[in-house]
Image: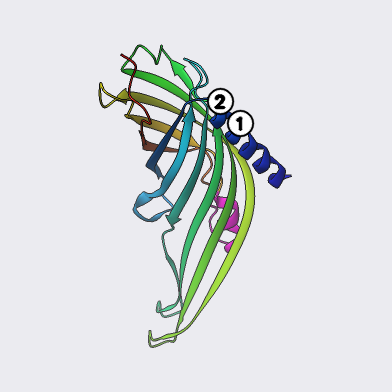
Amino acid sequence: MKRRVLVVMFLMLVTIAGAQVFRPYIGAGAYLHSDFEKSAFLNFKTGGEFNLSKYVKPEIEVSLLVGILESSVKLDDNYATIAEYRKSVSALNFSFCPKIILGNANELDAYFVLLPRYSISNIEANKRTYNYNTNGDFTTSTKQTIKDWSQSFGFGIGYNFDLSAENSDSLCLILDLQGVDMGKSINELSPTASRVDTKWTLGLGLNYYFSLKKKKA
């Protein structure tokens, strides 16, 4: 089922690219979450915008969510560390967004956009355990990996502004509510630990759009 959806998305990309103006972009962002180191996990993305109409410019995107969780330890009766646990997670996402323009993008140099997003994600969570003896000396380490697929919806609000009067290069600042739940895979690594949930995590991102042609005079 998921492979069929990916094939449909690819065919849509090829069809639209052959008939409409294409504008590629790259971007990055950070999402606030207290279970991760420095209370955040990161997002790196690339994709393309298709000029379907003045008010609807669909986007196809591939992104990577990555994060390292706060480490934890196990103590013996004398409060000496006998084990340390470190977890990390990543999600490779294939997304479609029917981006909606608020205002006439052909006449305005800056405008707001609405960004509803559907994503299919390949999630991988890793847990590495470091064992120590009673003297605090390292003895052994083990690694456990959980992989899963998921589908999700997210939503963002962006402010897009042009960088030049000569072409359509632009930046878009995005306040994003992402819906990919990486917590399910993380929680399977440690069923008895406190639960982690990354769904509906708020973040801030930035997209840079590259022009492939000059603006019309």
Tell me the residue at 38%/88% (across/down).
135
Which stretch appears magenta? 182-196
Q: Amino acid at mark 2?
A: Ala
Q: Is residue 46 magenta?
A: no
Q: Mark 2 Cα within 10 Å, few/some/many (few <14, many 20+)?
A: few
Q: Nearer the viewer, residue 171 or 89?
A: 171
Vertical placement of 96 versus 135: above or below? Answer: above
The image's mark for residue 15 is 1
Residue 55 seen in the figure: yes
Contact flag, marks 1 and 2 (Cβ < 8 Å):
yes
| Residue 129, horizontal then vertical, whole percent | 49, 73
Query: Residue 85 at what x, y percent from top left?
Result: 47, 69
Give the residue at x 50% y 55%. 90
Image location of residue 147, percent across then percent down: 61, 59
Three-letter amino acid code of the residue under disc 1:
Thr
Residue 71 in the figure: left or right of residue 189: left
Is 188 magenta? The answer is: yes
- Image quarter hosting the C terminus: top left
Circle 2 is placed at which residue position? Answer: 19
Q: Is residue 7 left or right of residue 161?
A: right
Residue 191, visible in the rendered structure = no
| Relative height, residue 148 to residue 8 (above, below) | below
